[in-house]
Image: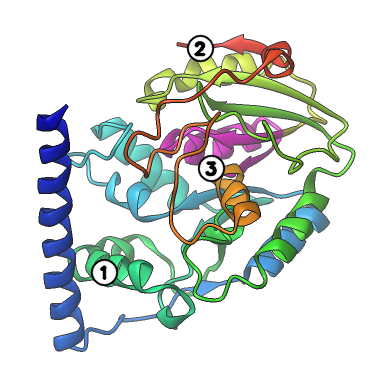
Amino acid sequence: MLNDLLAKIRYKVRYGTQVEWFNFLYLLTRKKHVYIPKIASIDETIDKIIKDKCSISRFGDGEVMLTLSHKNIRYQVGSEELASKLTEVLTSNVEGHLIGLSDVFCDLYRYNRKARRFWRTHFYLFENLWLDRLNPNKQYYNTFVSRPYMDFADRSHSLEWFQHMKQIWQDRDVVFIEGAKSRLGVGNDLFDNARTIRRIIGPPQNAFEKRNEIIREASKLNKDVLIILALGPAATILAYELHKLGYQSLDMGHVDVEYEWCRMGATQKVNLATKNVNEVSGGHTVQDAGDLYRSQIIARIE
């Protein structure tokens, strides 16, 4: 246990040092984006999904890094196939399918210090990935639709965004495609206005490798269900593929965790008792989710 603790401390010191260094270089060089992509606000993104029953695939730092085949992130190893598929989705133009980007290309002071430092570091190292793959004339939508709390400096609007978001699944038959410990809606009221809830449980790691099995299982569903995905980078691709099959499918990873933190008034990312939090040390250790949760599971893919 002592060795694990020391390893965690060494990692945090190393990571913190790297972030501070690249953040300093970003500010020192006054690095600016060649162009600012057009990204809708959170409310505009929610309204678009509700009005036109759109699907959405979200691209954050991890998904964009995985467009490089040699890159790996936590819970998903990279590959040529994964990189090719993510690039296909990011550069796609399919009617009714939205591409979400992190709205961090301007006005970083909307976000807290930790988030600002992270994104400055990311852009210092990886901005060319975005420039190579984005279309400066395309309308993008907002990934923070599923992360509207923790990274913001002003969190006074977060609960309003969650309430607005709930209109998406009002009186809908919802099917979650989620990781084994994601457990969307367990222990809170985020999805209490859905008509029904069912769950397809996917693998907790490297879910991309099981995407064909997941698609086959999802294809058994009626086309009028609303599919909500929380399955890492695989969800970005699955939302796109399922949309092309005629399903409204939303890549909404982290939305439930963010809602829990919002209800708690948390000021930093913390563990949750019954669901996995992959951004916190020890966040994979969870309690039993209960009988209702188990009764909602219609398939498991391991």
Q: Mark 1 and mark 2: span between their CA atoms?
A: 36 Å
Give the residue type at disc 2.
Answer: Ile
- Relative to 193, is 243 on the left or the right? left
Q: Position of residue 261 (x, y in %)?
A: 56, 52
Q: How many marks?
A: 3
Q: Taking 196 as reference, is 251 above or below it? A: below
Residue 253, numbered label: 3
Along the line of sight, the residue nearer the viewer: 122 or 286: 286
Picture quarter containing residue 196? top right
Residue 127 part of the magenta segment: no
Which secondary structure, mark 2? loop
Q: Nearer the viewer, residue 291 or 302?
A: 291
Bin the neighbour count of mark 3 within 10 Å (Cα to Cα): few under 14, some 14-19, many 20 and up: many
Crowding near pointer 1: few (<14 within 10 Å), some, many (20+)?
Answer: many
Q: Is residue 248 above or below residue 211?
A: below
| Labelled pair 1, 2 in contact (Cβ < 8 Å) | no
User: Image check: 73 left or right of 135?
Assistant: left
Span shown in magenta: 227-253
Residue at 48% over, 18% down? 212
Residue 106 visible within the image: no
Name the residue carrying label 2. 301
- N-terminal of the pair, mark 1 or mark 3, is 1
Q: Secondary structure at mark 3?
A: loop
Is the C-beta separation of discs 1 and 3 under 8 Å?
no
Q: Amino acid at mark 1?
A: Phe
Per the image, label 1 sits on a secondary structure element best described as helix
> Compared to 51, does 250 lie above or below?
above
* Relative horizontal placement of residue 62, taking residue 38 as reference (left or right): left
Three-letter residue code for mark 3 = Gly
Q: Which residue is mark 1?
A: 123
Disc 1 versus disc 3: nearer the observer: 3
Q: Where is residue 5 shown, x and y percent of the image?
A: 16, 37
